[in-house]
Amino acid sequence: MLVDIFKTAPREHYAMWSQDVRYSLRTMARNPGFTAVAALSLALGTGASAAVFGFADSLMLRPSP
């Protein structure tokens, strides 16, 4: 019985994951403007936080020569 669970669980999880991916792609295709704004804001936020961390790392965490 336990072996059956380990055999079927990955297939079920993959099926649910693939349904979620298809749904998200359909939703993003219906509203490309929102998708572009969301992707751009995530990219800008990630870049800004990386830049701030790099600046703080060079000033505070690394010893001065």
Image (cartoon, helix red, strand yellow):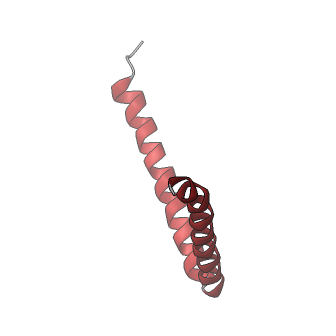
Q: Quadrant of the C terminus?
A: top left
Extreme residue toward the bottom, this view: 30
Identified at 63% across, 70% down, the residue is 18
* Depicted 40 relative to depicted 25: above or below: above
* Depicted 34 relative to depicted 49: above or below: below
Picture coordinates of residue 35, whole percent (x, y): 58, 76
Residue placed most toward the observer, 24 or 58: 24
Extreme residue toward the top, this view: 65
Extreme residue toward the left, this view: 60
Extreme residue toward the front, this view: 1
* Depicted 64 relative to depicted 16: above or below: above
Identified at 63% across, 63% down, the residue is 11
Identify the image quadrant of residue 36: bottom right
Identified at 65% across, 76% down, the residue is 22
Q: Is residue 23 left or right of residue 63?
A: right
Residue placed most toward the observer, 31 or 44: 31
Identified at 39% across, 21% down, the residue is 62
Q: Is residue 2 left or right of residue 52?
A: right
Picture coordinates of residue 49, whole percent (x, y): 43, 49
Residue placed most toward the observer, 18 or 3: 3
* Depicted 23 relative to depicted 41: above or below: below
Picture coordinates of residue 61, whole percent (x, y): 36, 25
